[in-house]
């Protein structure tokens, strides 16, 4: 990732905050067979590692996991809010005309070393922990113990745990820091008029995808 001082973010609390708010990460691993890319939701733990530990799980029947050695280096990319920025939103458009389109975004790159977890008891505990994390604060929250024990046991048999100890965190917030205050305000006002939640967009995608089948 191209790093520029104006957009570079090193504040660990901000980096951790983006990971927690946008937990779907892109896991990238280089192997003898070439690069592998998976999209997985991660829980960030900070109690046992200075930069944090990323935890998730994936389908065990993916043959890729059979060739991943413990300690293999990997990269997980987390993407925050992003949007196309139109020059029509800049007041300076009518003053000097020296404006151009842009794309604003925030991202975190987490480098680390991967460890696979196959122990059933550990996996079951991790699934409970991950579920409790994502269900926290929800009305009528679901808990793993509501499901039959044999059902959960069968699910655990079909997954592999993934722990990644973070060794480097890089953040980039390219969000108009170079613009003057008037242009920034113009962008903010335009974006707020276009507001649509990620959950609503997902619902729309689900409906359109179902109709296309």
Image (cartoon, grey):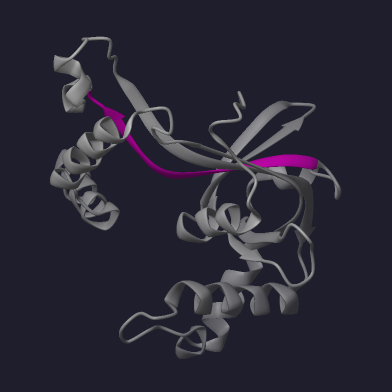
The residue positioned 27% from the left and 14% from the top of the image is: 99
Q: In the figure, residue 141 lies in which quadrant?
A: bottom left
Front in this rendered view, residue 59 or 53: 53
- Residue 48: x and y in percent read 79, 70
- Residue 46: x and y in percent read 70, 67
- Residue 90: x and y in percent read 21, 25
The residue positioned 18% from the left and 28% from the top of the image is: 89
User: Does the rendering let one see residue 60?
Assistant: no
Front in this rendered view, residue 25 or 102: 102
Q: Count how many numbered circles sit on residues in the image.
A: 0
Front in this rendered view, residue 155 or 142: 142
The residue positioned 16% from the left and 22% from the top of the image is: 88
Look at the image and give the residue range highlighted in magenta. Answer: 73-86
The N terminus is located in which quarter? top right
Front in this rendered view, residue 176 or 191: 176
- Image side of residue 34 versus residue 183, left or right: right
198 shown above or below 181: below
Q: What main secondary structure does the magenta stretch of the protein show? A: strand
- Residue 202: x and y in percent read 26, 51
The residue positioned 31% from the left and 35% from the top of the image is: 181
User: Does the rendering let one see residue 71?
Assistant: yes
The C terminus is located in which quarter? top left
Q: Residue furthest top?
A: 97
- Image side of residue 212 versus residue 49, left or right: left
Residue 12 on the magenta segment: no
Q: In the figure, residue 179 lies in which quadrant?
A: top left
- Image side of residue 141 versus residue 153, left or right: left
């Amino acid at each position: 990732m191209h790093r520029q001082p104006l957009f570079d973010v090193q504040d660990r609390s901000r980096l951790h905050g983006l990971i927690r708010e946008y937990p779907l990460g892109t896991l990238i691993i280089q192997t003898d067979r070439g690069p592998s890319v998976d999209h997985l939701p991660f829980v960030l733990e900070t109690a046992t590692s200075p930069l944090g530990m990323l935890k998730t799980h994936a389908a065990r029947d993916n043959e890729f996991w059979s060739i991943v050695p413990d300690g293999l280096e990997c990269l997980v990319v987390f993407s925050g809010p992003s949007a196309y920025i139109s020059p029509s939103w800049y007041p300076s458009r009518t003053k000097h005309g020296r404006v151009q389109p842009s794309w604003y975004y925030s991202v975190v790159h987490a480098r680390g070393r991967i460890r696979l977890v196959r122990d059933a008891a550990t996996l079951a505990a991790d699934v409970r922990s991950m579920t409790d994390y994502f269900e926290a604060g929800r009305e009528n929250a679901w808990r793993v113990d509501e499901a039959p024990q044999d059902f959960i046991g069968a699910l655990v048999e079909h997954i592999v745990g993934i722990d990644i100890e973070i060794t480097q965190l890089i953040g980039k917030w390219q969000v108009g820091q170079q613009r003057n205050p008037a242009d920034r305000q113009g962008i903010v006002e335009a974006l707020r008029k276009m507001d649509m939640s990620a959950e609503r967009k997902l619902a729309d995608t689900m409906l359109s995808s179902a109709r296309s089948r």
